[in-house]
Image: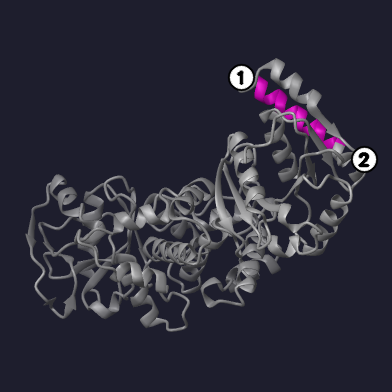
Amino acid sequence: MTALDLSSPVAVVGTGTMGQGIAQVALVAGHPVRLYDAVPGRAREAADAIGARLDRLVEKERLSGADRDAARARLRPVDDLAGLAGCSLVVEAVLERLDVKQELFRELEGIVGDDCLLATNTSSLSVTAIGGALRVPGRLVGLHFFNPAPLMPLVEVVSGFATDAAAATRAYETARAWGKNPVVCADTPGFIVNRIARPFYAEAFEVLESRGADPATVDAVLRESGGFRMGAFELTDLIGQDVNESVTHSVWQSFFQDVRFTPSLAQRRLVESGRLGRKSGRGWYDYGEGAERPEPHTAGQERPPAHVVAVGDLGPAADLPALIREAGIPVREEDQRGERDGAPGACLVLPGGGRLVLADGRTSAELGDAVHFDLALDYRRATRIALSASPRTAPRTLAEATGLFQALGKKVSVIGDVPGMVVARTVARIVDLAYDAVARGVATEEDVDTAMRLGVNYPLGPFEWNRRLGRTWAYGLLDNLHRRDPSGRCAPSLALYRHTHATDEREGTP
């Protein structure tokens, strides 16, 4: 099954920001496009807005004047649904209410031909449930674009329980012909991106609610150490706290209140107070005129340690000994032999006898005179590292740990003794949900990685990230978190357990 022919008319129902964006994508690809909105006059306003954006594309030399004129000639607003007769594809981008979408598609079935492909842009509703109201549910498919649709490359192609394979294939090939990167997804709450991305927000909120760090510090650590484009607090302010919480709540409810997707009470209070983010002028941050952005916690300058002993295999932090040597600090490496002063595991031993341990789901207090350091996407390129200490940590140990990373050119943020810290717990939970989704037939590993990179701009897809971390790291961290909080919120999935404990003749291959 091939993509729709460019002569085939495409209709978009609903002319908000997303509807206009989808219409522009189809229009620039070369299709005749019809616009409809239930509010009188909105379709014509949307056509004018799309025309203005085409003008800007010409100004930026991304579209020729001739192509713009041809596109404008192919764009036609209509005053009623009957004007969509003869279309080969109808994409709806209306209110996220099941009854509204079902009624719309029932009406469309009486207007368009039986060979017309119907698509919903829903981000939170069941494609199966929407199709359940149709006479021919096999032709309904999910086409989930990301905002802004003309710029974001990802489209999730979602098959409901009754979706015909031919319909899904045609939708996939059409999205690809439009210049998008489509991924195939089963009809599951949140599809790929909104399902697997939940921990990015949830773990940041958990650190806040645990009084481990303030929003500015968490955001800085996620960006500068984790390699994420934005931190969770600033991103939810951009999305809209009400929108982000609504998606989280929908996924949680759709999974029958699965504890892994539990919404945040702190975010609920923010929404209740009307602090919805940038659009209301205040969310986690104040966007009012003259408001100053709070600075992340950054430790004062400390002297670097005179030397360091690297004990055992540091796993994801294996680059540190070389970086420390490059900074002019002598490093002696020792094999790991059982427990060292009662604390098992690889570590960096500081001159005062204290230990630096990569975040592993334990608290620093459990390790005695020790400091945890957070995971980094790339320890050479990271510009900030988070450390966590406890009352059992000697002041000298924290000072030496701080000075060590400062000697490597990093800013240091000291946070509370939160097991798993910030980046480590976030990445481990994202990896776990990715393995669980693939094991349940939601999508392939390749499509999951593509979706998370292109849909939410993660620096790596979860499977690629886990290959870098090593087979056992994510599972080990989550297992430690689960032992300390047996509610099940951070319990590693059976899929990740199987992956971690699978045998492989290539020892150490994740």
In the rendered image, the quadrant that contains the C terminus is bottom left
Question: Which is nearer the eye, 195 or 324?
Answer: 195
Residue drawn at (11%, 76%) of the image: 338
Cα separation, mark 1 vs mark 2, equals 33 Å
Q: Who is closer to the viewer here, 48 or 356?
A: 48
Residue 374's disc is none
| Tag nearer the camera, 1 or 2 | 2
Q: Is residue 311 left or right of residue 285?
A: left
Residue closest to the far top: 66
Q: Which mark is residue 61?
A: 1
- Residue 220 percent location from the top left of the image: 43, 53
Residue that badge 2 annotates: 79
| Image spot of residue 232 (x, y percent) | 51, 57
Which corner quadrant of the image does residue 123 belong to?
bottom right
Residue 448, placed above or below residue 201? above
Q: Is residue 450 above or below residue 432?
A: above
Q: Position of residue 328 (x, y in %)?
A: 12, 47
The three-letter code of the residue at mark 2 reads Asp
Q: Is residue 45 magenta?
A: yes
- Residue 466 counted in the magenta span: no
Circle 1: element type:
loop
Dominant secondary-structure state across the stretch colored magenta: helix
* Amino acid carrying mark 1 in the image: Glu
Tell me which corner region of the image, top left, top right, bottom left or bottom right, holds residue 217.
Answer: bottom left
Q: Earlier in the sequence, mark 1 or mark 2?
A: 1
Q: Which residues are magenta?
A: 44-58
